[in-house]
Image: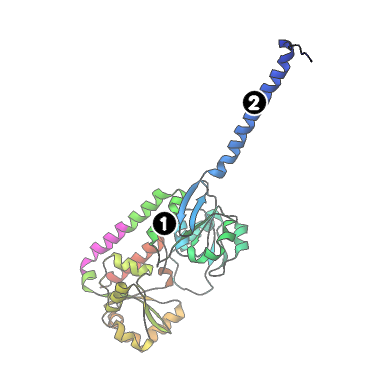
Amino acid sequence: MHSFSAPSARALWPIAAALTSTALLVACSTTTSSSTEAPATSGRTVETVLGPVAVPEQIDSVVVIEGRRDLDIALALDLPVVGFPLEGEGSLDLESPLAEARAAAVAEHGAEGLFLADEINIEAIAEAAPSVIISRSDDVEEIFDQLSAIAPVVAIGDQDTSTWQDDLRLVAEATGTTVRAEELVTAYDDRVADVASTYADVIAEHPVVPLGSDSSGSQVRPNRLLSTVLQDVGALPSEVFAEAIETGDGIEHSPERLVEAYDDADGIIALVNGADEWSATQASPLWSRLPAVAAGHVVRSDKSTHEGGPLTAMHSLDVVEELYAGF
């Protein structure tokens, strides 16, 4: 049987010191590891139509994919937009409702067009290295995994699925800009109330229509942004506009039915894309026979007011006010 003698206190001291040092190192290592990993777990998680998305607390750059509602919201919230889609050359001649804010993003954040609208370039998005990507869900659903490998994707709706106010609040929740979002909604509501009050008699007496027109005919769509702005101020809709609102569907007419369809409208917001198309519209004998045209109660806009967020909504109110101020 083997026997062992008890070690002296002096002999145990180096071992105890070593164990103490090791414990301190482990504690420091754990603290350092936790501090390093904290940013990865910090941030905000929001529910989108494509599922929950975790967005980092610090947002240094944003890329938008569709270029209308998503870009409008990002610019209005003063997010650091660095990339957006480009419209084709010469497609529109009227200044975009987003022109000023987009120019500011170019100056402040080096924002640039990454690809043509409807021609998403994933490599260009990756090179921009955004902190977050914002887009209409329809445009990113099929490439969601590829985009998510680059940055979190906050997917929003469109005119047929959600209001711009809802999507503004969603993006604001994701980016920590909820105060700014509520300021924007309040500013819009206040402006709507002002226009409705200022032109109350004119609005009540004169039916109007947001009339899209091109070589293939005419159309009225109730969910376009400018259409909803008209409804917000309490516009008296023309017969076709009223039917579109009631059914929730767009209504189209062939060129030869232009006068028959819209002769009850006292005012028209003509939604015509491009200077050439507008010249052709004005040169049409049928166009000149419309009572609103003959009376000079026509204001022009284009597809830039079909969709958007708070900036486009306020611009649309300018267009609506211009129409009513002409009576």
Residue sitting nearer the eye, 1 or 64? 1
The quarter in which the N terminus is drawn is top right
Gap in Å between the C-alphas at discs 2 and 1? 49 Å
Side (left or right) of 316 relative to 117: left
Residue that badge 2 annotates? 24
Evaluate whether residue 77 shows in this view. Answer: no
For the point 71% across and 11% down, which residue is it? Answer: 9
Numbered label attached to residue 168: 1
Where are the magenta residues, as a range?
189-201
Q: Label 2: few (<14), some or many (≥20) within 10 Å?
A: few
| Residue 37, image x, y percentages | 59, 40
Amino acid type indicated by mark 2: Leu
Estimate the x, y position of residue 141 in percent, counting from the top left.
Answer: 52, 64
185 shown above or below 119: above
Q: Secondary structure at mark 2?
A: helix
Residue 229 is labelled as: none
Which residue, as the protein is rendered here, is positioned at the far front? 1
| x, y percent for residue 318 | 34, 65
| Residue 262 on image: x %, y % | 30, 82
Applied colour scheme: rainbow
Please tell me which residue lies in front, 175 or 276. Answer: 175
Q: Nearer the viewer, residue 15 or 138?
A: 15
Label 1 sits on a secondary structure element that is: helix
Tag nearer the camera, 2 or 1: 2
Residue 276 visible in the shown view: yes
